[in-house]
């Protein structure tokens, strides 16, 4: 039924489902309610901006998963997911943003009808799209079911990427290279930030070499000067100023697969603080990359980076990276492992991370980061953007 | 402390807080935990793409509200919110996306320390950003508190817009006019959709007459032909085709205030089905607008529109509009009233809606919508875009 070229082979979707069911068995659940749109897409191919209403994919013990969503969005599921129409459950429109009834009331009845009223059901308790009210509805309407927390169960299955996924991320990397080139080419003193963001989107959407861009899960962040002490400000209409550094945290996105990458641009003659940050991060990145190989742990990358920073008199203990891949707003991270002290997850070939070496200091911010792929023998940086402080005068 | 020009006067923020506290008193709560980023911004001015981690604003019985978020984002709160630094509570980074501890554990301790351990606490049970796990943490760590559902309590206070808010929405309207003009100017047979989306972003961000654009809460949706039977598909790299209709659901955004507006473009000679849809929706829109005046009810607008559609043989019973204003992803609607049968909310001057008259039919989609302001005597369309099916050959 899909009009678009399928994003992945049916065999790949089947393998994903098998992995997920094995993890469900290990977690002791019969049924998994998957509300994360990234997980929904990864399992079924479903793609649409419909996550502002309640929806989910239900992984049943056997057969096709079920798609559950607003009736009008079942049309989008027919067009984008590999599921047969019999597996799509649309709920009536009067359940949408109603104060009297909840879509999960409807789902509960559907699950009971299918014989799952007393099942062991896994739910993503800490996912954006699984609200306290959604859970309360399920608990109330499925009193004989046994619920358990399976937050990130599917996310973990996504940690090691397939060859096809890595192929998409390499295309996203080409796009993010073009985005940073455009920033460097176009940014100048006096330019309004919103105009520079227009350039960033233009480069990200038109893409490069026939590869067209999708929307990244996070909008560009580009705070300047003192504002850049805060990591998550977006933009406004004010002009870029001489004597200020601006970091650009952006991602290329291809078919929902991301390659984030940050660089910092100084307009004018950089202060010593920026030059010092550049040196520390360049050296720290190298140390982190040297620790990024199969068999090492997530924390080893962070420790190597933090060690170099400490030598330069900079203390950082915030998370310095996270897994990346298929994502929807509000986050292009996968919310499983973290590159930080104490994370003992073993690195495996095919894992991909944003090595997020940002520094948010007392009166400035500096970001110079890489998206990385763990290979059989070490690490590869997905994108090729000069690893330095950019300067324009 | 803010570096940016304040978005609203302190008096306006004080009035918002007063309204909210009156509603809290009516709901019987002492303390309100506000997780919706739109509500957080409306109350405090806080702006940043940080809602992918747990955060909230706590409206206390007296004094300034508290801002609660990741420690590194407290810097952003200093720069964007009107709150004093003493009102900002940052949680340590090892609470971020941890499987061992939850940010709401930390908040619970902070609330206990401030004497709110046995308070009557309102929470937004059905908000995207208030997960089942967040609620479970609060219930566990504040065993003496009494929780009640205050979903949309703040959203309802936002229903009638201030003069300043309407001013921003008028600027957003100028932007969306420019976006549709650009679509008409640039769309052509053979153009890749991602390239057309680049044009849409360019128009939306550069804006018009010195008004620069912000990011809309939803990305452009522009399905074509058969795809347009599904309302929420985004775009891909395929070219626009002759003989197909494409609807464009986009919004101008200024300082987080939205003016959504949809139009449909047919490349080639429109089929009779498109011409019929145009006639029906034009006439139905007029009927709906005639019913949009103070004293009438939300359902009156919907009934007038549905009545005309029925005359044309089209049955529609899905929601046909929703309130708009300040928003963050994933939705530019305010999630309070709806323009649909059974919604008895009385229309008041200063209310703003997207009158969403989209038709998603068996093999096509057609959208021709208006964003409207209820005035003292009737209604005003915020944007001025020709109300017709656009055709290019």
Image (cartoon, coloured by chain):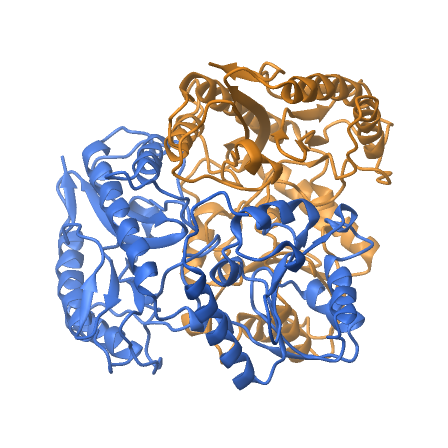
Chain colours: A blue, B orange
Of residue B358 and residue A289, the one placed in the foreground of this image is B358
Residue A178: percent from left, percent from top? 23, 41
Of residue B312 and residue B152, the one placed in the foreground of this image is B312
Tell me: residue A161, above or below residue B323: below
B358 displayed left or right of B377: left
B86 displayed left or right of B353: left
A373 displayed left or right of B276: left
Tell me: residue A6, above or below residue A62: above
Residue A384: percent from left, percent from top? 17, 52
Of residue B260 and residue A267, the one placed in the foreground of this image is B260
Which residue is drawn at the image coordinates 79% and 25% (left, top)?
A: B309
Of residue A79 and residue A288, the one placed in the foreground of this image is A79
The quadrant holding residue A298 is: bottom left
Residue B186: percent from left, percent from top? 40, 20
> How many callouts does the rendering have?
0
Residue B360: percent from left, percent from top? 66, 34
The quadrant holding residue B345 is: top right
Q: Is residue A50 visible?
A: no
Q: Is residue B23 visible?
A: yes
Which residue is drawn at the image coordinates 75% and 67% (left, top)?
A: A108
């Amino acid at each position: 039924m899909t009009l678009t070229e399928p994003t992945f082979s049916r065999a790949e979707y089947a393998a994903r489902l098998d992995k997920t069911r094995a993890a469900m068995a290990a977690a002791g659940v019969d049924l998994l309610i998957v509300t994360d749109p990234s997980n929904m897409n990864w399992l079924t191919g479903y793609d649409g901006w419909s996550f502002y209403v309640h929806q989910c994919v239900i992984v049943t013990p056997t057969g096709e998963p079920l798609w559950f969503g607003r009736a009008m969005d079942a049309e989008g599921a027919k067009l984008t997911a590999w599921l047969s129409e019999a597996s799509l459950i649309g709920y009536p429109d009067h359940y949408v943003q109603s104060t009297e009834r909840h879509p999960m009331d409807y789902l509960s009845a559907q699950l009971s009808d299918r014989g799952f009223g007393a099942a062991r059901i896994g739910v993503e308790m800490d996912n954006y799209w699984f609200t306290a009210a959604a859970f309360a509805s399920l608990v109330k309407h499925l009193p004989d079911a046994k619920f358990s927390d399976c937050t990130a169960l599917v996310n973990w299955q996504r940690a090691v990427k397939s060859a096809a996924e890595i192929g998409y991320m390499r295309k996203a990397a080409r796009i993010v290279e073009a985005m940073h080139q455009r920033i460097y080419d176009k940014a100048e003193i006096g330019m309004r930030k919103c105009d520079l963001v227009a350039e960033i989107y233009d480069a990200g959407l038109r893409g490069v070499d026939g590869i067209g861009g999708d929307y990244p899960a996070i909008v560009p962040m580009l705070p300047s000067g003192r504002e850049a002490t805060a990591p998550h400000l977006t933009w406004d209409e004010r002009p870029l100023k001489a004597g200020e550094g601006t970091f650009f945290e952006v991602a290329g996105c291809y078919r929902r697969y991301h390659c984030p990458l940050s660089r910092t641009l100084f307009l004018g003659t950089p202060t010593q603080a920026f030059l010092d940050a550049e040196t520390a991060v360049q050296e720290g990145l190298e140390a982190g990359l040297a620790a990024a190989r199969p068999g090492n742990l997530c924390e080893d990358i962070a420790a190597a980076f933090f060690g170099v920073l400490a030598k330069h008199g900079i203390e950082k203990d915030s998370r310095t990276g996270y897994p990346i891949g298929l994502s929807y707003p509000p986050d292009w991270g996968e919310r499983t492992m973290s590159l930080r002290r104490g994370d003992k997850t073993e690195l495996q070939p095919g894992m991909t991370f944003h090595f997020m070496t940002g520094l948010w200091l007392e009166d400035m911010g500096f970001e110079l980061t890489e998206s990385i792929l763990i290979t059989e023998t070490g690490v590869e940086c997905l994108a090729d953007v000069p690893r330095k402080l950019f300067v324009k005068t």
